[in-house]
């Protein structure tokens, strides 16, 4: 996929700030620190476009990026970070649920899980919700460069059992591994929607 333009459009803290031009959208979802912003930067080959950090729970808004003037990437806040306050946690739930349930432009949900760990109960819950609500979705196992290929195979097999119903692809934002496969899936669903 040739990315000719990629621009940060806005951070939305409420529904009325979502973009309104009707272009299709790909959403990136997953627990805090799993690598959502890094995946976006890696897919777009733009280093600092989506802000990454070592402080989990930083991104509290939905961040919109316009790609090739044709579609959006939406970087959602991470879930499951224990140290944020209860109010912040329930705000995440409200914002994400409202977005997932109501966003008509949503062409594909990319759910990220950490390839080094077993999917968490919240990962399982999100996958079940996406299946139940018939949302087209793809699972990306991030940070694949941090484990051996053998461990990666085991981890993907385990994730396939706990997260049924979606294709799972391994990714490394460090090496670019998985980039072509993830783009193929994104373009396929956009052509079908
Ligand atoms: P929040 O916005 O806080 O929810 O986090 P996020 O999911 O956007 O994670 P982010 O992309 O900020 O990455 C978190 C940390 O993991 C950063 O230190 C990244 O450099 C690192 N990281 C992300 N992806 C990879 C990867 O594929 N390989 C390696 N080695 N590190 C990664
Ligand atoms: Mg982020």
Image: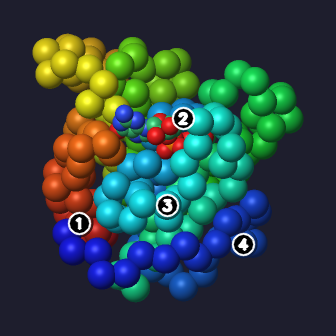
Residue found at x 47% / y 56%: 27
Q: CA distance from mark 4 to mark 1?
A: 26 Å
Tell me the number on the disc at residue 48: 3
Q: CA distance from mark 1 to mark 2?
A: 26 Å
Residue labelled with disc 2: 33
The numbered mark, 4 or 1, whose residue comes first in the sequence reads: 4
The numbered mark, 1 or 3, whose residue comes first in the sequence reads: 3
Beta carbon of the mark 2 residue lies under 8 A of ligand 1: yes
| Near-viewer residue (99 or 85) | 85
Mark 2, Cα crowd under 10 Å, few <14 / some 14-19 / many 20+, is many
Residue labelled with disc 4: 17
- Single out the mark in the foreground, 3 or 4: 3
Which of the 4 quarters of the picture holds residue 147? top left
Residue found at x 67% / y 66%: 11
The numbered mark, 2 or 4, whose residue comes first in the sequence reads: 4
Which of the 4 quarters of the picture holds residue 58? top right
């Amino acid at each position: 996929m040739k990315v000719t333009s990629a621009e940060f459009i806005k951070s939305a803290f409420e529904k009325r700030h979502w973009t309104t031009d009707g272009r299709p959208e790909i959403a990136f979802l997953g627990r805090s620190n799993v690598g959502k912003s890094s995946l976006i930067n890696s897919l777009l080959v733009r280093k600092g476009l989506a802000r990454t950090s070592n402080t989990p729970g930083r991104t509290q808004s939905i961040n919109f990026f316009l790609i090739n003037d044709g579609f959006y990437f939406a970087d959602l806040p991470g879930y499951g970070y224990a140290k944020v306050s209860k109010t912040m946690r329930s705000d995440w739930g409200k914002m994400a649920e409202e977005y997932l349930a109501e966003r008509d432009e949503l062409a594909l949900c990319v759910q990220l899980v950490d390839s080094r760990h077993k999917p968490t109960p919240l990962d399982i819950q999100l996958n079940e919700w996406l299946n139940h609500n018939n949302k087209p979705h793809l699972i990306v196992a991030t940070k694949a460069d941090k484990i051996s290929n053998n461990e990666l195979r085991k981890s993907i097999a385990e994730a396939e059992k706990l997260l049924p119903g979606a294709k799972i692809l391994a990714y490394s934002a460090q090496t670019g591994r998985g980039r072509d496969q993830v783009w193929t899936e994104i373009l396929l669903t956009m052509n079908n929607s």
